[in-house]
Image (cartoon, rainbow, N blue to C red):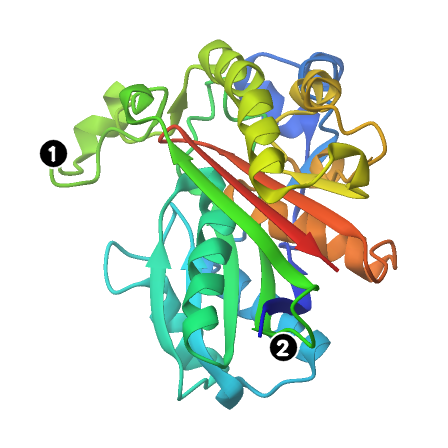
């Protein structure tokens, strides 16, 4: 028996942060941000909220969509690079607040590819062991951004996206194929230098910028536009799928201008590309899940449709997943 998506969910904070608000400390305005990114606004958490709070709400929505109870879950996996604490795993808080007493819970960090990495990992676990699992991508990047760095602070929003995975009603529907890639030689292109065992966090690292998220934007764009098209072509070849058969493309919501360049290069002329970045920004590991949930709730994903999920980001990493709805 295969593994399929039983339900989707998403949650973003209520606080809307405009381009003018986020751009002012960085010395840029609304027009500049829209031109560079296509982002109009994003959501940021309030002072009392953390990653697990967003993940719990997205998880609840996904369970409701699936028609399942938390006790039905065998696993809860939270993909995040902004956990509540270095330990315990953020998934432990999610398990507790959902009261999913039967579920083993752990985190996965593949930065912005995390949701697809987690979905692939959990799908393979469920192929071996019958049951249901909750996969959540959740990030609170607003807490690790340098307000004066226009390369990063304008891009990111906070949020969580989730799916419930469970047995497919037949072998044809569900998760058809997944493929994960890591380009570890490029590990310095997206990084938060301080806060781990190599550079323990201290106040001085905020002064020097080492405690903040940093990204070489040009190098990241070049990586995505150079590496992703051949990886996607090889992925389709291995799966025996013609790209023209794909009905929906749900990419990581990195940057609107980047996606404008990427989509034609992938040869997905027949696919509808789904986007949420204009109103939510780049929500890290949450972005693919949030965008998939939006497409699902809008009734755009129909039975038998092929859906390609693509995550890409720090590591550098690429995660691909092909679903038949």
Q: Quadrant of the N terminus?
A: bottom right
- Kindly tell me whether residue 157 is visible in this rendering: no
Q: Which residue position is annotated with label 1?
A: 198
**302 or 209: nearer the viewer:** 302
Mark sitting on residue 309:
none
**211 or 127: nearer the viewer:** 127
Q: Earlier in the sequence, mark 1 or mark 2?
A: 2
Q: Position of residue 29 (x, y in %)?
A: 68, 15
When asked about the image quadrant of residue 320, the answer is top right
State the residue at coordinates (18%, 40%): 196
Q: Which residue position is annotated with label 2?
A: 63
State the residue at coordinates (35%, 59%): 107
Q: Position of residue 291 (x, y in %)?
A: 70, 48
Q: Is residue 157 above or below residue 47?
A: above
Q: Quadrant of the C terminus?
A: bottom right
The answer to whether residue 6 is left or right of residue 99 is: right
Q: Is residue 123 above or below residue 196?
A: below
């Amino acid at each position: 028996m295969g593994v399929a998506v039983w339900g989707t969910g998403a949650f973003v904070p209520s606080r809307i942060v405009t381009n003018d608000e986020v751009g002012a400390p960085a010395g840029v305005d609304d027009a500049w941000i829209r031109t560079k990114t296509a982002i109009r606004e994003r959501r940021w958490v309030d002072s009392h909220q953390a990653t697990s709070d967003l993940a719990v709400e997205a998880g609840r929505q996904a369970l409701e969509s699936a028609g399942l109870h938390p006790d039905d879950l065998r696993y809860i996996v939270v993909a995040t690079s902004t956990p509540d604490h270095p330990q315990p795993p953020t998934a432990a808080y999610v398990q507790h607040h959902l009261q999913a007493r039967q579920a083993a819970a752990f985190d996965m960090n593949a930065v912005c590819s995390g949701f697809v990495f987690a979905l692939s990992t959990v799908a393979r676990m469920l192929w071996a062991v019958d049951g249901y699992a909750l996969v959540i991508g959740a990030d609170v990047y607003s807490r690790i951004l340098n307000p004066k760095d226009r390369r990063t602070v304008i891009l990111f929003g906070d949020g969580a996206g989730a799916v419930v995975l469970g047995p497919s009603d037949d072998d044809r529907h569900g998760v058809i194929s997944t493929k994960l890639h890591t380009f570890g030689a490029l590990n310095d292109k997206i990084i938060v230098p301080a806060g781990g065992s190599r550079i323990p966090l201290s106040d001085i690292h905020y002064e020097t910028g080492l405690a903040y998220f940093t990204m070489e934007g040009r190098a990241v764009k070049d990586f995505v536009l150079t590496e992703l098209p051949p990886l996607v072509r090889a992925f389709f070849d291995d799966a025996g799928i013609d790209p023209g058969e794909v009905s929906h493309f749900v990419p990581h919501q990195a940057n609107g201008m980047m996606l404008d360049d990427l989509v034609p290069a992938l040869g997905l002329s027949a696919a509808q590309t789904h986007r949420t970045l204009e109103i939510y920004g780049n929500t890290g590991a949450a972005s693919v899940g949030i965008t998939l949930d939006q497409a699902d709730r809008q009734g755009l994903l129909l039975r038998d449709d092929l859906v390609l999920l693509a995550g890409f980001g720090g590591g550098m990493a690429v995660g691909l997943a092909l679903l038949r709805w």
